[in-house]
Image: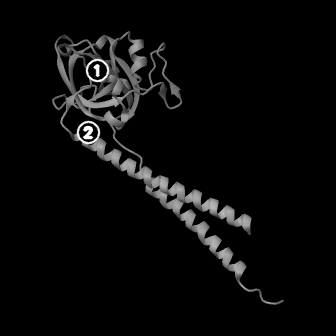
Amino acid sequence: MVCLAVVAVLLFSGFFALGTWQVQRRAWKLDLIARVDQRVHAPAVAAPGPDRWPQVSADSDEYRHVALVGRYLYAKETLVQASTALGSGYWVMTPLRQPDGAVVLVNRGFVPGDQRDRIAHPDTAARTDTTVTGLLRVTEPHGGFLRRNDPAGNRWYSRDVQAIAAARDLSDVAPYFVDAAADPHAAPDTWPVGGMTVIAFHNSHLVYAVTWYALALMVAGAAFYTVREERRPRRPG
């Protein structure tokens, strides 16, 4: 009986603690969603410069609405495999050199695999400064799910800023990239298509919390039933 009581207490405590942890995680996730929503819809601010690069992080800067000015380096463009609502294809990652010499990788948007030879390279954006607005994104190191980036073979599965910069011999590169906003003046058949950032956060913490708390209550109920049965007077045989 004592052993069963100890097991019941341990199980109840464990399940209750897990439920409480999920409640805390849910509060954190809701706060994150609110902060990201505020960043996305806020007016664009200047993208972090070299003095702020060491402080850039997902918690404080991911999906921040930013603006930057510079000239595109089309010769050092990189295509990264992507799967989007428009189908499979590539993200077009183009370096943008700013007036101070710093470089920011800009995800100009999506292009289908069979349209990669039709990617637009406006000459004016390479010869004169152009303004880009979009969402700041944190680098995606190493590669995609089960597939590692292959710089030597020029096969890219994630937007790994450091690896792309090294492969393209770029220096003074920001530790983040920017998902460019959609161009409202672009022709329908112009590639790449910007503004395709998917902002979604998996939030099932309430379901998990209810599940753990329910298990804790089941343990408590089973323990109560067992104790009650043990204390019930036995009928003489």
* Amino acid of disc 1: Asp
> In the figure, residue 199 lies in which quadrant?
top left
Badge 2, how many Cα within 10 Å: few under 14, some, many 20+? many
Q: In this rendered view, identify the residue nearer to me: 183 or 114.
A: 183
Q: Give the numbered dot on residue 51.
A: 1
The answer to whether 215 is drawn above or below residue 114 in the figure is below
Who comes first in sequence, dot 1 or dot 2? 2
Residue 184, percent from left and from top: 17, 32
Seen at 67% across and 79% down, the residue is 228
**82 relative position to 193: left or right:** right
Secondary element at image label 1: loop
Question: Residue 88 in the image: x percent, y percent?
Answer: 40, 31
Q: Quadrant of the C terminus?
A: bottom right
Task: Classify 10 Å Cα crowding around label 1: few (below 14), some (14-19), many (20 and above).
Answer: few
**Residue at the image point whose x is 33% and y is 21% from the top:** 93
Q: Amino acid at mark 2?
A: Arg
User: Is label 1 in contact with label 2 (beta carbons under 8 Å)?
Assistant: no
Q: Position of residue 98 (x, y in %)?
A: 23, 16
Residue 111 in sight from this viewpoint: no
CA distance separating discs 1 and 2: 21 Å
- The structure residue drawn at horizontal position 42% and vertical position 12%, both measured from the top left corner, is 167
Q: At 30% across and 43% down in the image, what residue appears? A: 35
Question: Residue 120 is drawn in which quadrant?
Answer: top left
Of badges 1 and 2, the one in the foreground is: 1
- Tell me: residue 78, above or below residue 201: above
Q: Position of residue 212 (x, y in %)?
A: 53, 59
Q: Quadrant of residue 106?
A: top left
Q: Which residue is mark 2?
A: 39
In what element is the residue under mark 2? Answer: helix
34 on left or right of 29: left
